[in-house]
Image: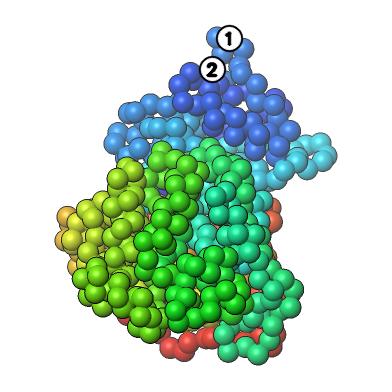
Amino acid sequence: MDLIPAPRTAVPDEGGRRFALGPAPTLAAAADGTGPVARWLRREIGAATGWDLPAPAPGTPGDVRLRVDPDATGGLGPESYRIEVGPDGAGLTGQTAAGLFWAAQTLRQLLGPDAYRRAPLPGPGRTWSLPYGTVVDGPRFGWRGMMLDVARHFTPKDGVLRQIDLLAAHKLNVLHLHLTDDQGWRIEIRSRPRLTGVGGWRARSRWGHRASPLWNETPHGGFYTQDDIREIVAYAAERHVRVVPEIELPGHSQAAVAAYPELGNTDVVDTAALGVWEDWGISENVLAPTEAVLRFYEGVLEEVLELFPAEVSPFVHIGGDECPKAQWKASAAAQARIRELGVDGEDGLQSWFVRHFDRWLADRGRRLIGWDEILEGGLAPGAAVSSWRGYAGGTAAAEAGHDVVMCPEQQVYLDHRQADGPDEPVPIGYVRSLEDVYRFEPVPPKLSPEAAAHVLGAQANMWTEVVEDRSRLDYQVFPRLAAFAEVVWSRLPGPAERDYADFEARMTSHYRRLDVLGVDYRPPGGPLARQRRPGVLGRPLEGPPPNV
Ligand code: ACM
């Protein structure tokens, strides 16, 4: 059946029989919880095939039948499903509405690559069929995510909606949006219009990695209006994808400081003269540790909470990584603040920020999540950690009873290059091939079973300093996201025992799906000429990545 991600069990018909659909198949949706999936199937499969998929005549079962049944899979979990295809058609049963949606995604794969088209191919003689058999399936993890950095290079709204469709096609269910950074602020905050009016734009961008002497002199920017965000969140929810917003503090904040100079350390730097950062790296221009800054960000987060209701994402990501301390060291005001708060130096100031928003979010029934640096100051029990500096932070957090999302840099940072050689565009980091990602294991073997239960799942992180548009984004993300999806969905054996040859064989079918979807993936043979960036400096690292 060539499914990706691989299902728990798939039992094909021994005789290779198939159920022929058409020319006008019917779709039966049982009363409860099936409406959105029926709508999705009519829209997506309808577009590809030209079918209307009407309800069957009374008393007849329907060629495709949708149902939600808590006993669908005998306990494979809330996102599990069963598909049975036989002489009377296809029955899709989800344990929940989410499970039914994943069943519909599997059905689409079973129909073949043309089921991903937006219009039927012309000409007579086109037939559609499904292989007889039974698929029983459910995910290994509940958090199967991708982080998209829309701050360094902005992905316009339609690109985000497309990315949500691509995540859903791979049964991934979390989109973490990195909405703010030194180089741009990308979410409208009505009470603070300069955040996007000023912070959403930069005059130019370095072209290539930090050491590159080149500049792209085209101004860059953009942001999502609050209605754009509502649309993104609702579109994702229909596809059972949760959107997790990230508002960075107290570092990676130069765009905010450029918009509102009083947010910065005004006694050591002329923040009124700052612009949105045009370079890559970690800006020294961090937030000042004042009560006024706390109130400012509370106001920002109040609007963010309204846009991302708790049902969509109980989690709000506050960043918390890579906060340089030079300005706080030099600032008399920050030093006075250290004494007044009785915190442990500049590191104590960073955890003071994090702990404040940890409590503030908890008071509002929400959960803080942050990069693993947030562990350094002690966390409220409900807070969770994105473990990026290897597995260590996640391991410590899980052993301390915190929930963890594993996203170790050397394993699942999709901005890192995927092959050796001079043709990789703007190569960054160590080589992380498709096979390397396929052998990524989210749960370190030394975790106790209690701690392992705190690993919510994993996400692949996509930073976009050297990724200037959608085509470059596709190139970095695919095909590796397909391997990642299988790691977090399917119950694969340990990394060394995984059958990569089998995965690669199924990828032959999957590349056809990606072709039809218009995904500009890295071909197995290397980049196409237009996918290269000759002469643009990256920062490749040699040898195997450090084992962290
Ligand atoms: C990160 O990569 N700085 C989270």
Residue at the image point whose x is 65% and y is 21% from the top? 54
Q: Give the camera-side residue of 402 and 251.
A: 251
> Residue 438, image x and y in percent?
43, 66
Query: Total number of numbered labels?
Result: 2
The residue carrying mark 2 is 61
Asked if 261 appears above or below 56 in the picture, the reply is below
Separation (CA) of disc 2 from disc 1: 8 Å
Q: Residue furthest right?
A: 123
The residue under label 1 is which amino acid type?
Pro
> Residue 190, image x and y in percent?
57, 48
| Residue 470 in sight | yes
- Residue 149 is left or right of residue 221, and the answer is left
Instruction: Please tell me whether mark 2 sits on a helix, a strand or a loop.
Output: loop
- Residue 495 is left or right of residue 152, and the answer is left
- Residue 190 is left or right of residue 117, and the answer is left
The residue under label 2 is which amino acid type?
Pro
Residue at the image point whose x is 35% and y is 37% from the top? 78
> Residue 543, image x and y in percent?
43, 88
Q: Is mark 2 within 8 Å of ligand 1?
A: no
The residue carrying mark 1 is 58
Q: Give the camera-side residue of 302 and 280.
A: 302
